[in-house]
Amino acid sequence: MKKQIIFIMATLFLMSAWADSGLEARLNQQYQVSFEWMLKNLPQDPDRLGSVAASPTKEYQYHWSRDAALTHQALFEVFQKTHQIQIKNKILKVFQKWVLFEKKAVRNAIESGLGPGEPKFQLDGQIFKGEWGRPQNDGPAVRSLVMSLWALELIKLGQKDWVLRHLYRPELPSNTSLIKLDLDFTAQNWEAPSFDLWEEIKGLNFYTLALQRKSLLIGAQLAKELDDPFAAKFYLEKAQLILNKMNLFYSSQAGYIVAIQNQVDGWTHKKSNLDVSVILGTIQGFLDLGFLNSQGPQVLQTAQKIENTFSSLYPINQNKKVPVIGRYSEDVYDGFGFTGGNPWFIATHAHAELNCKWARFNPRTASAFQKKGLLFLARSLEHVNQQTGEMSEQISRVNGYLTGVSHLTWSYASFITAYHACLGI
């Protein structure tokens, strides 16, 4: 596998003109490490096949629906970009195992009375029985989104029968058709309060809405492809309603898009409501210009507010061109306890990806945004383990060392998608 990964790096991508040779080499190396660690965090035990361990750290030896789907989003991007059949086949097999695992896990959640919004599972597919922030309705949205993208790809590759058998059947009830089950749940429950991706506040979340909208848009494409026109129409109608709601999250008084509205439960310490989850929702829910045409400047305002906040808040950001980014200014979670928040790799990579994606759709300012995206990736590289390329969950706000759980799968997946946005053609 190591030779295969090295071979990917030699053939996958052309590099951006903005990357100097030294940065290019380091980004290539980190891409290789990130891809390798994503695969390592996929358990190979027979009773755990298809699960995605959030981290090898004992406390994170669980399968989160959202994190797993985002991991497979990154793998799907690699699948699309590589021309190496061996790598494509490897990723496809990993995807098929994930589908079987999710079918088992979702069935367990439904039979337990928890429903598709159950966020956390044991690595054998059994539900996590402890207290937790339930439901998290971003899970069904991201899961159906990634699986719908795969389904459309597999149909192009002549595997429509496999899609109909395992992913989407145009019939009701939808409880045995995983994508249709998630799409119907999303369409019917998008207005329901759920816990945010940080599992702290229950309400209506911008991030969740963004992913729900995108999942319904892609799901409508799949429904049309599989002769389910009434479902496609239903999904598109709900996606438009979600877009209307997303447009109401901008606060002219604050000058940014707020993360949460209509809180009904959870922590009350996030007074600013300024959160990198808005940036994550934008890049992961980035499908068309429907939202950005009306709210693009507000997205950039929000990103700049976040950057300014963390530039002054964290000591390691002093005198830096761009900051490493945390979740939100009031954060107290340090990875194991509550001594104070830190920068996160996924948050920093989100700002890299946002700038590079924005550059693609704004030719007049593309150069500046592309350069800024690469600066964020370069900042991330400052804080990885310089010998091994390890990325943890967090970066110490004081000394810049790795902290929080080790080898967070999502950290690696987010680096890969940011790399594709900034350096892939």
Image (tube, grey):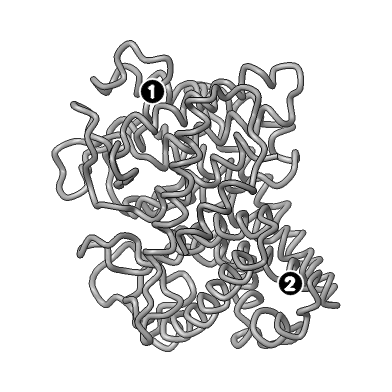
Of the 4 image quadrants, the one containing the C terminus is top right
Horizontal and vertical percent position of residue 52: 41, 68
Find residue 323 and name its label.
1
Q: Nearer the viewer, residue 84 or 72?
A: 84
Q: Nearer the viewer, residue 263 or 143?
A: 143
Residue type marked 2? Leu
* Residue in the picture at 55% in, 77% down: 99
Say which element carries label 1.
loop
**Position of 179 relative to 38 (above/below):** below
Picture quadrant of residue 341? top left
Q: Residues within 10 Å of mark 2 (few under 14, many from 20)?
A: some
Horizontal and vertical percent position of residue 384: 32, 38
Q: Which residue is mark 2?
A: 154
> Of circles 1 and 2, which is in front?
2
* Residue in the picture at 77% in, 69% down: 222
Q: Nearer the viewer, residue 382 or 314?
A: 382
**Position of 306 relative to 339 (above/below):** above
Mark before the other along the chain sequence, 1 or 2: 2
